[in-house]
Amino acid sequence: MSIIRIYLEADSIVSGNIAITTSINVTPVVNRYTAIVVLGNILGGVTTISAQNFTNDSGTSVAANSLVVPTSSGYYNVFVNGTLQRGGLTTLSATNLIINTGLIVGATVVVEVVNFNSSASSTSVNNVTVTTTISD
């Protein structure tokens, strides 16, 4: 006994488009700290100012280990008596700022840390149609 098989050929056509809209928001987050150099900050030609010697923009003392440091996409600037210092002269950590030179007592040091927060969202509208034709 033979088996009867149905043979059908189908063609599909896909047409249309998908529209995607993406919104990206980048927001800078700025932290500034101010300190006055005292004699205890200077040792062996290097000036080290600990976190708790700084105040923030509100005038509040910074807690130990609480200086904000730049993320991989952020940066920081150091100003001594209002003059921007060149890169590589300082090292900033959560615990302190190290300036690779001895400053004078009474100098004002300002640290500006800029980090960036980013967010993105996308929406898509599908305008695709599929038409299938079956022939025998």
Image: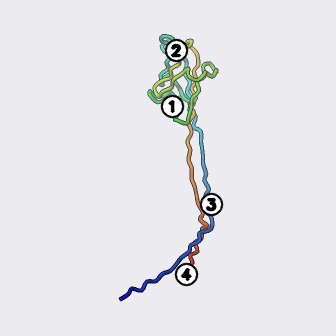
Residue tagged 2? 38
Amino acid under label 3?
Ala
Q: Which mark is residue 69?
A: 1
Residue 33: image location, x then y, percent: 55, 27
Residue 111: image location, x then y, percent: 56, 26
Q: Residue at x 60, y 21 (%)?
A: 86
Q: Residue at x 48, y 25 (%)?
A: 51
Q: Nearer the viewer, mark 3 or mark 4?
A: 4
Q: Residue at x 53, y 26 (%)?
A: 55
Disc 2 residue crowd, few under 14, some 14–19, many 20+, Cα 10 Å: some
User: What separation in Å lies between label 4 and label 2 (alpha carbons)?
Assistant: 91 Å
Lower position in the chain sequence, tag 4 or tag 1 = 1
Amino acid under label 1?
Val
User: What separation in Å lies between label 1 and label 2 (alpha carbons)?
Assistant: 23 Å
Residue tagged 3? 19
Lower position in the chain sequence, tag 3 or tag 4 = 3
Which residue extends farthest bottom?
1
Task: Give the colouring mode of the picture.
Answer: rainbow
User: What separation in Å lies between label 3 and label 4 (alpha carbons)?
Assistant: 33 Å
Give the mark count.
4
Q: Nearer the viewer, mark 1 or mark 2?
A: 1
Q: Nearer the viewer, mark 2 or mark 3?
A: 3
Residue 23: image location, x then y, percent: 61, 51
Please tell me whether mark 3 sits on a helix, a strand or a loop: strand
Please tell me whether mark 2 sits on a helix, a strand or a loop: loop
